[in-house]
């Protein structure tokens, strides 16, 4: 049985196409893995900053709600220690 030249050419072309697709897919997966790694690094950095800010805010809350601080605020002028002034001082409330 004789195999035609066209069949051999198509077989070689098909094999090369499959190899090219496999190489392209492998490259795509590697690039996506690298990009996801960079995104993960950025998110970990953001998480660390947010945890630090949370820790600072918890310390400030503990300071503001301590017994000594509350007694000091109770003895002082009520206008100086309203919740709104503390919140606006921290930047939580914006002027409308």
Image: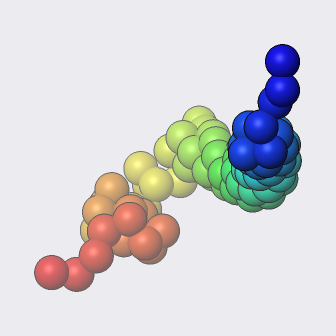
Regarding residue 94, the answer to whether it shows in the image is yes
Give how far across and how far down residue 38 sits, in percent: 79, 57
Q: Residue at x 31, y 68 (%)?
A: 93
Task: Quarter of the image for the N terminus: give it.
Answer: top right
51 displayed left or right of 71: right
Query: Residue placed farthest to the left in the image?
Result: 96
Q: Residue at x 81, y 30 (%)?
A: 3
Residue nearest the observer in this picture, 71 or 7: 7
Task: Quarter of the image for the C terminus: give it.
Answer: bottom left
44 displayed left or right of 81: right
Residue nearest the observer in this picture, 43 or 19: 19
Q: Quadrant of residue 94?
A: bottom left
Residue nearest the observer in this picture, 36 or 77: 36
Above/below status of 8 relative to 75:
above
Q: Quadrant of residue 78?
A: bottom left
Q: Quadrant of residue 46?
A: bottom right
């Amino acid at each position: 049985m004789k195999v035609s030249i066209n069949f051999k050419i198509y077989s070689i072309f098909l094999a090369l196409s499959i190899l090219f697709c496999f190489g392209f897919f492998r490259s795509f997966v590697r690039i996506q893995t690298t990009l996801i790694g960079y995104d993960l690094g950025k998110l970990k950095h953001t998480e660390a900053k947010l945890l630090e800010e949370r820790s600072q805010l918890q310390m400030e809350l503990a300071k503001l709600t301590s017994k000594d601080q509350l007694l000091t605020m109770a003895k002082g002028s009520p206008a100086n220690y309203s919740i709104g002034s503390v919140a606006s001082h921290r930047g939580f409330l914006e002027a409308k």
